[in-house]
């Protein structure tokens, strides 16, 4: 019984010891937490009280930077596709079969170089027929000229007959008059008189006949002249037909219209060739001139005003990172696209070694000179109010709110078009409670010895980033 009682007391003492240790541990933890939590707060409160005591009634401190001029140029990088300065699809001008092809894709050709030959037997026969018709027309002209000469000779002969008949008529008239007088005096018989009068009538009729023959001869001359004119017109028509067929026969030889590179070839010898450029007709070649290339870009409105002939542009091609290609603006649209607010601009770049190819992707860097002096400041200097945007300028130790017009906003920095001058002391992250004309104490940022934290005012080197 005593032994059991002693064991019970021993167990109670051990339980009480464990409980006491647990209570002490909890108390220690509580004390540590109180020390960790309360001590910093008490120190912070002491510092705040000290700061409040120091700043109550003191002049506000303003952190400033000196406004620097922005770059005098404005640049932009635009995507673009490179194209050939000249590009054409070559079609056949005659129907036939491809006799021979003398070039292939990738070949460099000269202006006027023979590219292919087309066999055109139909045109050859038509040309032979046209030349025969021309010879026939010229023979007809010779015949008409001979007929005209004969008609003229006949006209001359008829006119001579008229003169002769008129002479006979005059003689017969005088003779008839004389015999009538003689008959009236009884010197000749009335029968003789009547014969002379009849002879006069006969010669008069002959004159009229001869005059009619002259008119007929003149009409024949006119007719032969008309035939000559008709024959000459026929010759002109036949000559035109011959020239047309000769020209078409010349199209048997397909030549290069300018110097360039064959970029595509669609035919082989023996292929049926059809003239024209309809979609159903097969083109022969595609030719591009690539010693000079053209690039079209759509320039945004904000820099479009700088685009004029002669402006230089950097052409960057990813495949040639080590090379710099320089292009030049040759044409710029007279207006902006109302849908995209961009101005179509053509840039040409020399490509003497032909390393650039049509269809390549490139990036175009365009740079324009501004027409005014802009100022670049940190974005934290801008104060936005209902009546506009302002910056706080410190001059002679006093606050001055200046309205500004923003040109470009880069986020961490802005370019001011109007309202600031180079050298102005501009407040960074100004207090909203600053009043116009309020005296302040200025603390400027110095590169070698920065006195402000990065959150309070950006470093000048950071301000130079676009």
Image: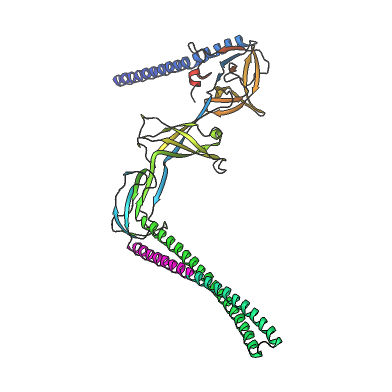
Front residue of this view, candidates 99 and 458: 99
Camera-side residue of 296 and 418: 296
Left-right relation of 150 to 440:
left
Q: Residue 114: x and y, percent?
A: 33, 49
Near-viewer residue (211 or 74): 211
93 in the magenta segment: no
Q: Where is residue 422 in the image (x, y as percent from the top left)?
A: 58, 18
Tell me residue 168's x, y (percent): 59, 77
- Pick whichever, 180 or 460, lies toward us: 180
Q: In this view, does 381 lie to the left or right of 144?
A: right
Q: Quadrant of residue 117?
A: bottom left
Q: Is residue 41 positioned above or below 212 on the image?
A: above
Q: Residue at position x 44%, y 39% from top?
A: 294
Query: Could you tell me if residue 23 is visible in this image?
Result: yes
Q: Residue furthest front?
A: 187
Rendering quarter of residue 166: bottom right
- The residue drawn where x is 49% and y is 14% is 40
Q: Please report the bounds of the magenta region as a residue range.
A: 120-149
* Residue 459 in sight in this render: no
Q: Residue at x 65, y 16 (%)?
A: 399
User: Is 146 inside the magenta-drawn segment?
Assistant: yes
């Amino acid at each position: 019984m005593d032994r059991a009682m002693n064991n019970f007391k021993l167990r109670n003492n051990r339980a009480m010891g464990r409980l006491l240790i647990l209570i002490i541990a909890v108390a220690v933890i509580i004390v540590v937490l109180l020390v960790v939590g309360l001590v910093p707060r008490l120190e912070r409160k002491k510092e705040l009280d000290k700061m409040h005591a120091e700043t109550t009634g003191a002049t506000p401190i303003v952190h400033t930077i000196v406004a620097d001029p922005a770059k005098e140029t404005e640049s932009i990088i635009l995507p673009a596709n490179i194209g050939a300065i000249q590009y054409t699809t070559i079609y056949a001008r005659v129907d036939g079969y491809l006799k021979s092809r003398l070039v292939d894709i990738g070949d460099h050709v000269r202006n006027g170089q023979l590219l292919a030959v087309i066999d055109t037997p139909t045109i050859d026969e038509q040309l032979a027929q046209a030349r025969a018709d021309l010879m026939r027309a010229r023979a007809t002209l010779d015949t008409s000229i001979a007929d005209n000469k004969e008609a003229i000779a006949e006209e001359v002969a008829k006119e001579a007959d008229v003169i002769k008949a008129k002479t006979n008529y005059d003689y017969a008239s005088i003779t008839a008059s004389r015999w009538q007088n003689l008959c009236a005096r009884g010197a000749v018989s009335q029968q003789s008189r009547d014969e002379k009068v009849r002879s006069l009538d006969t010669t008069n009729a002959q004159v009229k006949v001869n005059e009619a023959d002259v008119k007929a001869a003149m009409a024949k001359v006119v007719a032969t002249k008309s035939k000559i004119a008709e024959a000459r017109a026929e010759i002109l028509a036949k000559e035109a037909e011959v020239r047309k067929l000769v020209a078409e026969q010349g199209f048997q030889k397909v030549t290069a219209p300018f110097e360039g590179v064959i970029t595509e070839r669609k035919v082989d010898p023996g292929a049926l060739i059809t003239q024209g450029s309809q979609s159903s007709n097969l083109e022969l070649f595609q030719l591009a001139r690539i010693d000079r290339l053209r690039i079209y870009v759509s320039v945004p409105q904000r820099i479009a005003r700088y685009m004029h002939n002669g402006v230089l542009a950097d052409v960057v091609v990813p495949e040639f990172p080590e090379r710099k290609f320089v292009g030049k603006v040759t044409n710029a649209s007279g207006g902006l696209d109302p849908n995209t607010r961009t101005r179509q601009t053509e840039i040409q770049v020399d490509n003497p070694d032909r390393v650039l190819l049509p269809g390549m992707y490139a990036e175009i860097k365009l740079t324009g000179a501004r027409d005014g002096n802009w100022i670049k400041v940190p974005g934290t200097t801008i104060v936005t109010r209902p009546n506009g945007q302002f910056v706080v300028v410190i001059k002679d130790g006093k606050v001055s709110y200046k309205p500004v017009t923003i040109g470009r906003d880069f986020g961490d920095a802005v370019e001011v078009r109007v309202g600031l001058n180079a050298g102005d002391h501009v407040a960074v992250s100004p207090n909203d409670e600053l009043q116009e004309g309020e005296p302040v104490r200025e603390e400027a940022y110095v590169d070698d010895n920065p006195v402000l934290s990065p959150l309070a005012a950006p470093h000048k080197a950071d301000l130079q980033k676009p």
